[in-house]
Amino acid sequence: MHPLRKMYCRTFQAALKFAIPFLPYRHPKIIGSVTGIPEVLRKKKCNSVLIVTDKGIVNLGLLKRLKKALKENHISFVVYDRTVANPTTTNVYEAVNLYHAGQCSAIIGFGGGSSLDCAKAVGVKIARPDKSLASMKGILRVRRRLPLLIAIPTTAGTGSETTIAAVITDAQTRHKYAINDFPLIPRYAVLDPQVTRSLPPFITACTGMDALTHAVEAYIGNSTTPGTRKNARMAVSLIFKNLDTAVRDGDNLEARRNMLHASYYAGCAFTKSYVGYVHAVAHSLGGAYNVPHGYANAVLLPYVLDSYGECIHKKLHELAIAAGIAKKDIPHYKGARIFIYAIQDMKKRYGIGNFIREIREEDIPKLSHYADKEANPLYPVPVLMNAHELEKFYYMLMPKKASHRARPDYRAYARKKVTAPEAKTETADKQADVPVTSGQSLSGKVEKSHE
Ligand SMILES: [Fe+2]
């Protein structure tokens, strides 16, 4: 990247970092079960509520417990279940009409990122009936309190229950845009493991890797705070301890609960400290080829971490310690190597490959341009890269283009003989030389890989 552009990016990021303590960030209060919602609604004097969800959630019967709890507490409700993936302005306007027809005073978003985003956008339109959704795209355009908003995530990964953003697609033009403002952060997040039980193993794995990417990218960026670093470490620790179990045994409620908490903590971390090039590249792939977000992140994460080099070794070592896979007294570069290898190992266990076959070479300049536009200057990444420099990640993901030089061999990397002078102990050497995770192979128990 040109030195002047670098200077511009770093100045922009420093200004945002300086502003963090003065901005009205808040964390949603956690409720442990959907059965705890009526008590909150009663306290807030809400007698009627709109539930925004999708057909899949309804067909799986996931609404039943919530409906029963509301009925038992004499709280009336209306259900909007037509939310689509990439929710549209039509979804939002239909749900708003239902909100008014049901004389509601609160909104519950129940589902994955799409339903939660739709619920947030409904709240925006209730708070700002005079303004179109499109006119509020961008940052800080809402500036008004939303009705009571409760988020019930049914995937443990997006962190949408903690963020200031709602991504909406214009039903006519198909233009996709984000509305970002602090009132969009839900007041409550319901982290109820029962609602994630039916998530298939492969989706559990990919959404869990998305949460891991949020935590890692927030942690290695330059705009962290003690709070976001703590949240990221907590998320990484929970993911390494629970994702294998949640993928292998979806009925294990403790693992499911811990993954919901991991996703929540990772969301709290990246809301303030941002993500990085993994997300920027993954978003471009999602937009062009509909590659699932969590899958694209998981494929990319080790490559992008490796490309940052030495400047993130200390931070990756800290995350490896938080994950319980490395000791404190080993050199940072070894800790970093262990962490990157462990991610590669997780991918393998979950059936997540190293390539995205949809990538066409002729699309790469455009895709890297989108990634550059998304990330620079906003994301406080450890090493700045322009569109041209980002192109390498797309080439790495193309099976035909990948070469030994472009695509690191992480197994060999993790076993590389230690020659650096700071390598002190035999224990440290041994620790880097053995496979760092011991989870049972899950191949055959997960859905077919995307690759
Ligand atoms: Fe993400």
Image (cartoon, rainbow, N blue to C red):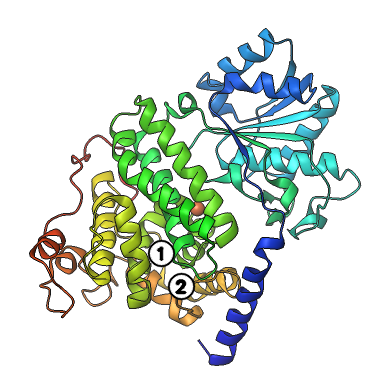
> Which residue does the image show at 26% across and 71% down from the upper left?
333
Disc 1: CA contacts within 10 A as few (<14), some (14-19) or many (>=20): some
**Where residue 341 sits: x, y (%)?**
24, 60
**Where residue 376 sits: x, y (%)?**
58, 74
Q: Tag 1, which secondary structure?
A: loop
> In which quarter of the view is residue 99 placed?
top right
Q: Tag 2, which secondary structure?
A: helix
Mark 2, ligand 1, within 8 Å: the answer is no
Mark 1 near mark 2, Cβ–Cβ under 8 Å? yes
**Where residue 271 sits: x, y (%)?**
59, 55
Residue pushed farthest bottom? 3
> Which residue does the image show at 58% across and 18% down from the upper left?
35
Q: Amino acid at mark 2?
A: Ile
Q: Specify the label residue 333 is tagged with.
A: none
Query: Up-down: is 329 above or below 110?
Result: below
**Where residue 17 sits: x, y (%)?**
62, 69
> In which quarter of the view is residue 344 placed?
bottom left
Query: Up-down: is 205 above or below 374?
Result: above
Q: Specify the label residue 364 is tagged with.
A: 2
> Which residue does the image show at 24% across and 50% down from the upper left?
348
Q: Amino acid at mark 1?
A: Ile
Disc 2: CA contacts within 10 A as few (<14), some (14-19) or many (>=20): many
> In which quarter of the view is residue 54 placed?
top right
Reading the image, the residue beneath label 1 is 359
In the rendered image, is residue 356 in sight? no
